[in-house]
Image (cartoon, rainbow, N blue to C red):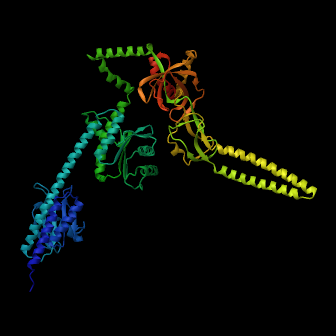
Amino acid sequence: MASTPSQETVEQTKQQIRTLINEIAELSRADAPSEEFFPAVLKRIVDALAAVGGAIWLLDDEGQLKLSYQINVNQNLLEAHSDDAAKHAKLLSRLYQRGQSELVPPHSMLGEGQDEGNPSQYLLVVSPLSSGGKQTAGLVEIFQRPNSAPNIQRGYMRFLDQMASLIGEWLKGRTLQKVSDRQVMWQKADHFARLVHDNLEKRDTAFTIANEGRQLIGCDRVSVAIQKGRKCKVEAISGQDTIENRSNIVTALNNLATRVVSAGESLWYDGTVEDLPPQLEEAIEDYVDLSHGRSIAVLPIRRPEKVVEGDVHSKETVQREDLSKREIIGALIVEQIESQVPPEALRSRCDLVYEHAARALNNSMTHSDLFLMPVWRTLGRATWLFRGSTFPKTMTVLSLLAVGLLALFLVHINHDLEAQGSLQPKTQRQVFAHVDGEVEEVFVEHGEAVLAGQPLVKLRNRDLEIQLSELNGQLDQTREQIVAVAELQNRAADRAERVKLTYQGREHVAHEKALLEQYELLQEKEQKLTIRSPIDGIVMTWDLKKMLRARPVVTGQVLVTVADPNGEFELELLMPEKRMRYLDQAIEASGGQPLPVDFILATDPSVDHQGTLSIDAIHARAELDSTEGAVVKLRVHPNSMEGISPRPGAKVIADVTCGRRSAAFVWFHEVIEWVQANVIF
């Protein structure tokens, strides 16, 4: 006697089924693709019914049922030329047309020729799928074991009907999504068409095709190249306002477009180059190495034929005409780097962009190639100035402009040459290192008052110390030798020996004298290790101890600057060399008299000060400045120090007056000189 399941087992089974139903309901409400939705749903249905397998059949574009997903379906039912598959297909077609759920027993056949039915050994539980409305979108089929009671089989069918309704809700959502996507695509296409035909400027049209075309296609980059002679030149790249024609990637793209246009056929690159000609294979590989494109399409843009409206014969001729006979005017380059647009959708969208791009680009090129079109366009835009009520206003403005231009040449103003510099004490000295060494001690700080001869910095020269030590040793040794020779001379009995010792003593004395002279020179050099102030004044060098302490220095290196703040001040100006011609002319015209100078200080720019520039205060040689370039140094003597804060190094902006010239010359002579030097020359 068979054992009946316990109440606990039944409850667990019901809970599992409810869980599966809830999961299927959640999946039907999720926005999952069919590749994920069908496997997940069908597996849960098969598990909930403890079935052998199942399949989901959907209607394709041709109105035929097509298998979308299956689990454990017998291969005989799936083979195209199998008798069982043909019988099974006719059964599904009939059930689809009826649009009702049905239980089909195993090995059951219908019709006179027994050519329709269930050739399998399982019970078929079939339920229609509806995506909204009355029309059936497909079928869900379950292969169940046939040894179950009739009421259980009807339970299978009711459960499957419920699951089919959930799948139908998902199909309805997908259908609405497709309709919405199609509507959005048509709106984008309409927007693209209006924008691309809105302008007849060739460059603007190319940029519109590139930027708006990328949005319509959904790719990563769109470029437009225009054929000029035998070569193509990239005119626009989506997302870029300007194009650097000398860059490697633009050069490679120009080469690719040129070769594809020369071949006359579209290029669709998906990562493989096996079927491409060698010249295209080389060009596409060079470009992909730089752009890292995953998929690239290069479409030659051909000039569309003009069709007279209402001329049916002309339209038929254009439709029958081979596209390869039409003139190529450019190329459309579409690239996918990270985007995942399917190939079918990509081709259809590229065709849509291509049709509008070809006509818009052809119209803009025809318009731009008209003789003197920029001139005619400018004149056409300016004609409104001479029409109606604007004519008096235009003539008034033109009259004022004429008077202003005339005044520029008739009115004379001061010709001032601007120069920048600094306020410096007239008495200042730079203190140099007289010998090589290492800074051992710094005695003064920035701004500290010093006297002439006061120690500023002390250096240490270890080589000099070693030389002094060696000389001391040599002197001691020489003096000992002199004493020793004298003692030997006193004890010597032989006259010849005494003469010999006498000569040795003289040699030692001469050597001692030479060593003493060297010692004095080294002592003099040692005294120069202490750097002293040459004048009375204050220390001008900033942060002296931090800059010099323990720092090695060489002979001639500037260590400290000392200036007398109580003496006279002068302006040290840096006049650009290109302005010296006018300065020389002004000095010659003045007969060698000093030129007036107006200047302001950065410490107080609201107050104007005056000074004079003498001929002898102009350096005869130009120097190179790190900021101003080639300059000539000028020394300007202020007329008065009243109101001037005597801060050494304060920035100064000065105007040297070089006579009076016309306002046009004063304001525009540097512009004219720049054109002469950089454009005309």
Q: Is residue 494 above or below residue 298?
A: below
Q: Is residue 299 above or below residue 602?
A: below
Task: From the top left corner, tell me how far across and down residue 382 is, in percent.
Answer: 32, 22
Between 19 and 576, the one lying in front of the other is 576
Between 54 and 664, the one lying in front of the other is 664
Q: Residue furthest right?
A: 495
- Residue 663 appears left or right of 439: left
Q: Is residue 108 above or below residue 175?
A: below
- Residue 465 appears left or right of 182: right
Between 362 and 435, the one lying in front of the other is 435
What residue lies at 55% left-to-right and 22% top-to-bottom? Answer: 581
Total marks in image: 0
- Residue 487 appears left or right of 411: right
**In which quarter of the view is residue 366 placed?**
top left
Quadrant where the N terminus is found in the figure: bottom left
What residue lies at 10% left-to-right and 64% top-to-bottom? Answer: 162
Q: Residue furthest bottom?
A: 1
What residue lies at 91% left-to-right and 57% top-to-bottom? Answer: 497
**Residue 412 visible in the picture:** yes
Task: From the top left corner, tell me how far across and down residue 19 is, in percent.
Answer: 14, 68
Between 448 and 595, the one lying in front of the other is 448
Q: Residue furthest left?
A: 151
Q: Is residue 621 above or below residue 148?
A: above
Task: From the top left corner, tell me how far across and down residue 500 is, in percent.
Answer: 89, 54
What residue lies at 21% left-to-right and 65% top-to-bottom? Answer: 40
Task: From the top left corner, tell me how far across and down residue 412 is, in percent.
Answer: 45, 14
**Residue 92 visible in the picture:** no
